[in-house]
Amino acid sequence: MPLIIKDEYPEKLFRKDGKRLDGRERNELRPIKMEVGVIKNADGSAYLEWGNNKIYAAVYGPREVHPHHLAKPDRGILRVFYRMATYSVFDRKRPAPGRREKEISMIISDCIEPVLFLELYPGTSFEVFIEVMDADGGTRCASVTVAALALADAGIPMKSLVTAVAVGKIDKEIVVDLSGIEDKAGEADLPYAITWFNEEISLLQFDGDMDLDELNKFLDLAKNALTSIYQIQLETLKSKFLKLSEEPSIEKEEALIEGEK
Amino acid sequence: MMDIKRIISKIEKNYIKSNLKKGERIDGRGLWEYRDFKIESDIIASAEGSADVLLGDTRIITGLKYDVGTPFPDLPNEGVCTVMAELLPLASPLFERGPPDEQSIELARVVDRGIRHADCVQTKKLCIKEKEAVYILFVDMYVINHAGNLIDAGGVGALTTLISAHIPEGIIGENGLEWTGKYLTGETLVKELPLVTTYGKIDDIIFLDPNLPEELVSEGRISISTTESKITSIQKSGVATFSIEEIKMLCKDSMEKSKKLRKELNLLQYLNKTD
């Protein structure tokens, strides 16, 4: 039986004033908010609000591998589990992980692995759990971004952070950071991630149609957006350590007492 | 925070026990005190109702989705409300991936029974057309951080989610199912406010709202769901045994505790006013 309100797409994806349906310019990102250390039990964790997307990521590791036969004697392994909550989408999602979630988990894992020094952790595993609590387009890119943040929060050595964003084409116009509606009703979608230590592309998918000229535009637009998202990631991590350094430590207190004497 | 391990060392166990015997707890609470609740409602845009509940460090995010289906033949004019729980491996190293295990099924069922037997969800209001179309509500709980006593946090989460509901109102028109443009909210859907209180037991010491280390060393627990005037559901789990006097005492305490909690939490403030 269908849901009572139908999931329909609008005919036009631009308003009369030339802006997108949610009031953004073509090269404008949705509001992004990040936080680290949100899950106390985890070795590292992060939370990301990206427009209406709400995503949690937690990292456990390095720890023993279960099942044991997956362990590699010469290096650690990275396992990523991307999942969506049943209520995160318009039609209730079935609780068990589907094919889409498994594929995206693999894509994200492959995207992040290049920045880790897995060869330093033989016989262990790093597990990254990503839970999408609310979804509104671009969850795989948001997941890569938040997973990198959680790994950094866990204190795991990394060559650099990873950042991802999607660019696409709606009503024949090239835009950045597609919302849910734009993703479904648009003509093309290109999720794109960069590993900052070598500034190379670590995740790339494409669905739709484009010519070579458009490809250049896509990549330029993405690069600019990625730089500003990367800054938010860095600021989030910096503010965590600033907070830590502001907390009174034993050494500092001792130094103060010494000073008073 | 204490390291999270499945097995707690004898020293830690004895420490927790000897403290409890003195009427003290490792987090500084009294034996009959709750940790603080923090509630936010309607946080998920895609859901038709939601709640983010913190009980100390235990955190559960709950969301509501609906579907339209045919009613059960014996209840032709009543909708259905189901509760599901998932113990995400993200929430604790004690949780594993895979299909729901007994712990998550118990959580969902205890919360579900507390609500089901309490005249809480007005299932007759969930009927669109007798014998043909009724709402099926899915209240899905996701544990984000596990620091003990998931049941009480889940109970508050599920109830707040139902209270914050805004479900499109449907009628069977000429072209089948249509939206009236209005919403069914918690105001029509929810009547009684059942709350569940859980007590842990170690040896002969009983205490309210076990935190994770206490849960791991305790032999069992008992969860009692109550409304303003009635006990609606009880679940004893674990290997602990309770005397008749203890059960009577706990049922009385549960009524008092949940009455106080209902007042403090004032869950009806989370009613959705979309109309």
Image (spheres, grey):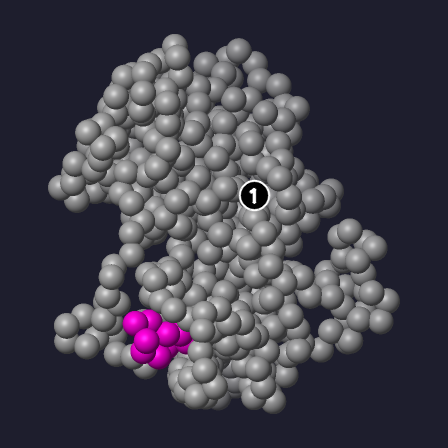
Q: Is residue A238 visible?
A: no
Residue that lies at the very extreme toward the right in this rendered image: A73
For the N terminus of chain B, the image quarter is: bottom right
Q: Is residue A137 magenta?
A: no
Q: Main secondary structure of the magenta part?
A: strand
Of the residues shown, which amino acid type is indicated by label 1? Ala
Q: Chain of mark 1?
A: A
Residue B112 sits in which quadrant?
top left
- Residue drawn 38% across the image and 64% down it: A183
Residue B221 sits in which quadrant?
top right
- Residue drawn 25% across the image and 59% down it: A10
Q: Which residues are magenta?
A: A166-177
Per the image, the residue denoted by label 1 is A96
Query: Residue A30: image x %, image y %?
Result: 32, 72
Near-viewer residue (B89 or A134): A134
Decide if residue A21 is on the left or right side of residue A185. left
- Residue drawn 25% across the image and 25% down it: B128
Label 1 CA crowd tier, 10 Å (few <14, some 14–19, many 20+): some
